[in-house]
Image (cartoon, helix red, strand yellow):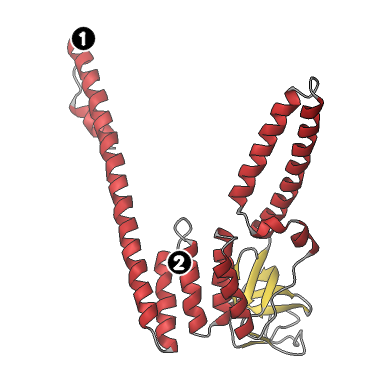
C-alpha cells in the first residue's frame, strides 16, 4: 500500500515521454528507500524486543534467587510463560522455569520443562541431572530406555538439525568418493564406510523425528489422578491406584476433555486433560 501511494504521487501523463523516464527512476529510488526503511525498522524492532526479553529474563533470575515460599516460586515459574513462544523459547528459559516449578514442588510441570529443554540442548548434563532430581523428588523412577535408544545412543547428544547436517556431510563425502570408486580401491572402501554410516544416522534421525513430532508425551500434574476405562468420570477405574504428580505417559487418543494414555508398566486408561501437561519427545 505504501508503494502504491508513492507511485501515484510521481505519475505523469504518457504524452511526456522524457519526463516519464525520469519518473521511472524516481519510482525505483523511492521503492528502494521504502524497502530499506522497512528492513531497518523491522531490525530495530527485533533488537528492541530481544533487549526487552533479556531484561525480563534477568529480572526473573533475580526474583528466583529472592524467592522463599512455594507461592513465590510458582509466581516466578508462571512469569516465565511471557518469554516462551513458538519461535522464541530457549533452553535457558525452559530450564529456569523448570527449576522454579521444582522449587515449588510442582514436579510434573518441572519434568515437562526439563524434557522440553533437553530437546533443544540434548547434551546438557545440568538439565539431565535436574530431571533425575525431579523424578526422585516425585517418587517416580525414570522411564527405562528402549533397545533402539541404546543402539542410537548419540540421539541423546545431538539435535535433529545437527543430525541432519552430519547426514548431509556423509552423503556428500560418499558421493565424491563414489565418482572415483572405479579408479581406487581405497575410494571404494571409503565410500562403503561413509554410506553405511549415513544409513545408520538416517535411521536414528527417523527415530528422533518420530519421537519428537509423531508421538505425544505427557506427565501428570495433579496430586492424584484416577484413570478411567473410558472418557468419562462415570467409568470404572483403569488402575488399582491413582496416578500421581510426575508420572509420565504417552498419549494414544483424545476425546473432548479426556486423554487416552499409556503408562509404561501399568497399561492404558483415560485421564482428564486438565490433569496432564503435554510435551514432545524424551
- Residue drawn 73% across the image and 23% down it: 179
- Residue 16 visible in the shown view: no
Residue at which label 2 appears = 93
Which class describes the residues within 10 Å of circle 1: few (<14), some (14-19), or many (20+)?
Answer: few
Residue 142: % across, % down:
69, 76
Residue 115: % across, % down:
59, 68
Look at the image and tell me in which quarter the N terminus lies.
top left
Residue 185: % across, % down:
82, 26
Of mark 1 and mark 2, the one earlier in the sequence is 1
Q: Residue furthest front?
A: 186
- Residue drawn 24% across the image and 19% down it: 24
71 above or below 177?
below
- Residue 211 visible in the shown view: yes
Residue at which label 1 appears = 17
Residue 228 numbered mark, or none: none
Which class describes the residues within 10 Å of circle 2: few (<14), some (14-19), or many (20+)?
Answer: many
In the image, taking residue 213 as reference, residue 194 lies left or right, namely right
Task: Kindly report the distance in space between the C-alpha atoms of the residues bearing marks 1 and 2.
Answer: 61 Å
Residue 110: % across, % down:
54, 76
- Residue drawn 60% across the image and 69% down it: 128
Look at the image and tell me in which quarter the C terminus lies.
bottom right
Nearest the camera: 217 or 180? 180
- Residue drawn 40% across the image and 85% down it: 72
The answer to whether mark 1 and mark 2 are in CB contact below 8 A is no
Instruction: Determine the secondary structure under disc 2.
Output: helix
Instruction: Determine the secondary structure under disc 1.
Output: helix
Nearest the camera: 128 or 84? 128
Amino acid at each position: 500500500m505504501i508503494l502504491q501511494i508513492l507511485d501515484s504521487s510521481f505519475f505523469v501523463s504518457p504524452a511526456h515521454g522524457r519526463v516519464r523516464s525520469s519518473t521511472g527512476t524516481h519510482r525505483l529510488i523511492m521503492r528502494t528507500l521504502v524497502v530499506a526503511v522497512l528492513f531497518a525498522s523491522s531490525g530495530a524492532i527485533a533488537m528492541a524486543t530481544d533487549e526487552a526479553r533479556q531484561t525480563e529474563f534477568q529480572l526473573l533470575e533475580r526474583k528466583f534467587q529472592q524467592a522463599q515460599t512455594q507461592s513465590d516460586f510458582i509466581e516466578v515459574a508462571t512469569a516465565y510463560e511471557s518469554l516462551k513462544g513458538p519461535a522464541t523459547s530457549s533452553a535457558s528459559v525452559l530450564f529456569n522455569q523448570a527449576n522454579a516449578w521444582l522449587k515449588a514442588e510442582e514436579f510434573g510441570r518441572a519434568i515437562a520443562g526439563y524434557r522440553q529443554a533437553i530437546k533443544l540442548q540434548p547434551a546438557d548434563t545440568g538439565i539431565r541431572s535436574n530431571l533425575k532430581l525431579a523424578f526422585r523428588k516425585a517418587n517416580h523412577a525414570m522411564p527405562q530406555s528402549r533397545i533402539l535408544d541404546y543402539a542410537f545412543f548419540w540421539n541423546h547428544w545431538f539435535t535433529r538439525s545437527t543430525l541432519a547436517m552430519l547426514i548431509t556431510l556423509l552423503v556428500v563425502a560418499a558421493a565424491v568418493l563414489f565418482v572415483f570408486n572405479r579408479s581406487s580401491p581405497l575410494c571404494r572402501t571409503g565410500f562403503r564406510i561413509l554410506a553405511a554410516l549415513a544409513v545408520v544416522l538416517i535411521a536414528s534421525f527417523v527415530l528422533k523425528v518420530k519421537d519428537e513430532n509423531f508421538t505425544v508425551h505427557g506427565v501428570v500434574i495433579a496430586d492424584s489422578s484416577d484413570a478411567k476405562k473410558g472418557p468419562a468420570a462415570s467409568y470404572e477405574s483403569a488402575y488399582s491406584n491413582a496416578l500421581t504428580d510426575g508420572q509420565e505417559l504417552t498419549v494414544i487418543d483424545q476425546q473432548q476433555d479426556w486423554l487416552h494414555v499409556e503408562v509404561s508398566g501399568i497399561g492404558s486408561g483415560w485421564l482428564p486433560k486438565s490433569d496432564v501437561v503435554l510435551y514432545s519427545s524424551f
